[in-house]
């Protein structure tokens, strides 16, 4: 996707505030720590087209509104991904401003997740 310069500058301004983590490190943490939560912040249509198998869906547009209901403990390890890594950085930064203390943006997002062969759930499948 071709992003506008203003959007890219905004993301780059937030990036230093956010801990970014690789897909292998994310997978290892999700396997080792049952409290860790993988969150897909993409839009509904993107989620419906396929998503990481362990993920819950909380779109970028509503994450600040809904996160406290879904994950009330602000110390819960949160791993956020989007299509390529930009919206997850913005979401992670926002959640940190709300008091969440263990938030990570997954480098590469959904595209990287698929490229690395991480577990996915696709439309029409009951299992990954």
Image: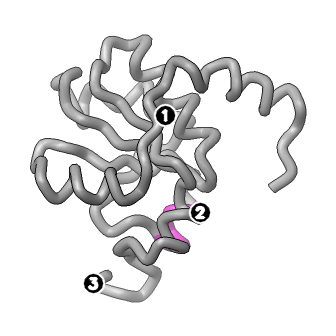
Which residue is drawn at the image coordinates 12% and 43% (left, top)? 35
Mark 2 residue crowding within 10 angstroms, few (<14) / some (14–19) / many (20+) = few
Where, quadrant-wise, is the N terminus in this rendering?
A: bottom right
Q: Position of residue 128 (x, y in %)?
A: 32, 81
Query: Which residue in the protein does label 2 denote?
Result: 45
- Is residue 36 one of those drawn in magenta? no
**39 lies above or below 31:** above
Chain-order first, disc 1 or disc 3:
1
Tell me the number on the disc at residue 73.
Answer: none
Query: Which residue in the protein does label 3 denote?
Result: 127
Location of residue 74 by image quarter: top left
Structural distance between the alpha carbons of marks 1 and 3: 27 Å
Query: Is the Cβ of the residue at disc 3 closer than 8 Å to that at disc 2?
Result: no
Query: Is the Cβ of the residue at disc 1 closer than 8 Å to that at disc 2?
Result: no
Question: Would you say 78 lies left or right of 50 here?
Answer: left
Question: Would you say 120 lies left or right of 89 here?
Answer: left
**Colouring chosen for the image of the structure:** one colour
- Is residue 47 one of those drawn in magenta? yes
Question: Would you say 32 lies left or right of 21 here?
Answer: left
Q: Position of residue 86 (x, y in %)?
A: 64, 40
Q: Nearer the viewer, mark 1 or mark 3?
A: 3
Location of residue 124 by image quarter: bottom left
Q: Which residues are magenta?
A: 45-50
Structural distance between the alpha carbons of marks 1 and 2: 15 Å
**85 lies above or below 14:** below
Q: Nearer the viewer, residue 58 or 113?
A: 113
Query: Which residue in the protein does label 1 denote?
Result: 62
Name the secondary structure under disc 1: loop
């Amino acid at each position: 996707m071709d992003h506008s310069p203003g959007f890219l500058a905004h993301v780059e301004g937030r990036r230093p505030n956010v801990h970014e983590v690789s897909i292998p490190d994310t997978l290892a943490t999700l396997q080792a720590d049952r409290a860790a939560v993988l969150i897909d912040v993409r839009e509904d249509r993107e989620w419906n087209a396929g998503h990481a198998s362990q993920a819950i869906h909380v779109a970028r547009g509503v994450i600040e509104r809904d996160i406290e209901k879904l994950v009330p403990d602000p110390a819960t390890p949160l791993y956020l991904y989007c299509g390529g890594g930009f919206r997850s950085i913005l979401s992670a930064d926002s959640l940190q401003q709300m008091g969440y203390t263990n938030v990570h943006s997954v480098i590469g997002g959904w595209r990287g997740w698929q490229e690395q062969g991480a577990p996915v759930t696709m439309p029409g499948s009951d299992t990954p």
